[in-house]
Structure formats: C-alpha cells, structure tokens
Image (cartoon, coloured by chain):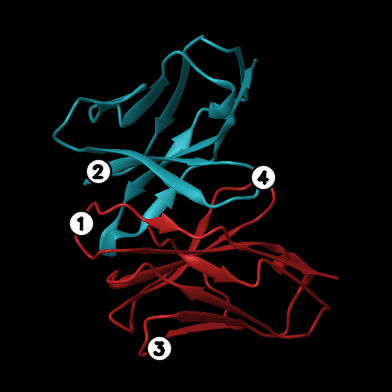
Amino acid sequence: SQQGEEDPQALSIQEGENATMNCSYKTSINNLQWYRQNSGRGLVHLILIRSNEREKHSGRLRVTLDTSKKSSSLLITASRAADTASYFCASTARNNRLAFGKGNQVVVIP
Amino acid sequence: AAGVIQSPRHLIKEKRETATLKCYPIPRHDTVYWYQQGPGQDPQFLISFYEKMQSDKGSIPDRFSAQQFSDYHSELNMSSLELGDSALYFCASSLARPGSPLHFGNGTRLTVT
C-alpha cells in the first residue's frame, strides 16, 4: 500500500463537535499534505506541513506531525455539515509525486 | 480562478474498446499528473509530465499511454479496456516547486461493461 495511511475508520459526529483523524506513513518525507474529497469529486488541498514543522493551523484546521512516530493528525474544530467528506493524507515522494493513503470518511450530522 | 478541466465527465465503454481522457491544466502550471481511483480506494498515481516531457511513472498498465501537448493539455489513452479499469480518473496540475499543492479536476468516471 502507499505510504500515508489513515486509521481506517469512518467518523460520525454532531455539528459543532471536533473531528480528529490520524495518518501514519512508512518512509522519510519532505512534507505531508491533507486533501479533502467530496463524494465522486476531485480532491481539494487543505494544508501542508513540512517535515521540520510540528504543528500548523489554517482556519478551523490543525495539523500535527510527529516524524519520530511517522504520524500526523488532522483536527477539524467546530465541525459543520459541509465538512462531510473523505479526508486523505499524502506524503510527498520524489518528483513531487503524492502517495495517498486510504481516506477517512467523516459525516457531520446537522 | 481557472481550475483543472477534465473531459468527458462520464464515459461508458465496452471491454476491449479504447478510451481517451482529456485534461486542461491550470494556466502556467508546468506539471500534470494522472491518478486512478477505484471505488472506495485511495488515488493511485499513474504518470506525470513536466513541461510536456514524462517526468515520473507509477502503476500505469502497458495498455495505457499518455502525453502532454504543446498547449499543455494532456490526454490519457486507454486501450483493450478491462472491467477492472472502471474507476475515477483524475488529472491534477501544479507548479514544479517541491511541496506545491496539486490542483485536481473533477475527474472522469469510466465505466467498462
């Protein structure tokens, strides 16, 4: 499988709650990115964290990176129904190729 | 802002037929990628082009080929289609700087019957 693997679980939460999903990868990375995909649509870039960063924020998103454990987490705070989607982490390999992990489906119930 | 345009949006073919998917990258993006995503699967990298030259190759079957043209649009050609080729095919474009985010099109859903 590709490096960049999310915990294979679907998450169902109430609107306003926080959603956390995790990702692990196998090899050294230059950076790790998170993408979001609505059903049957293209992936949308959310946030990038470089290998020398430990935490990054963007609006309601918070990403952490632990290179010693080869893991990352994505936190969505104050979730909204519109956050319902699948979320993928992807590590950057050579030639800027993104290696995606399996998506983590999040359902936010209004 | 202009996004990545893919056509067609849906395509239905029979086994052993051929299919051609088209991709128009964001203007001034110099790199184009093709990904295949099976039902419930993560996107799998197929091939990429930088400045119209193939730059990287992933798990692309020999039955598939791709190219990037002088106007930077790209085409993925698929021959001798098999049932297992049914998937979403995404094109993405980016700048060639390390860590540049990929901008994805909405994909072509190929169904092989």
Q: Are marks 3 and 2 on the same chain?
A: no
Q: Quadrant of residue B86?
A: bottom right
Label 1 sits on what residue type? Pro
- Local packing at callout 3 (Cα closer than 10 Å; few below 14, some 14-19, many 20+) is few
Q: Which numbered disc, 4 or 1, marks the residue that appears first in the sequence?
A: 4
Q: Are marks 4 and 2 on the same chain?
A: no
| Mark 3 vs mark 1: in front | 3
The chain holding disc 3 is B
The residue closer to the viewer here, B72 or A89, is: B72
Q: Residue at x 28, y 73 (%)?
A: B30
The residue pinned by badge 3 equals B69
**Residue A28 seen from this side:** no
Q: Is residue B29 visible?
A: yes
Q: Colour of chain B?
A: red
Mark 3 to mark 1 CA distance (whole Å):
23 Å
Q: Which residue is mark 4?
A: B40
Q: Are marks 3 and 2 in contact (CB under 8 Å)?
A: no
| Badge 3 and badge 1 in a common chain | yes
Q: Residue furthest front?
A: B1
**Residue denoted by label 2:** A31
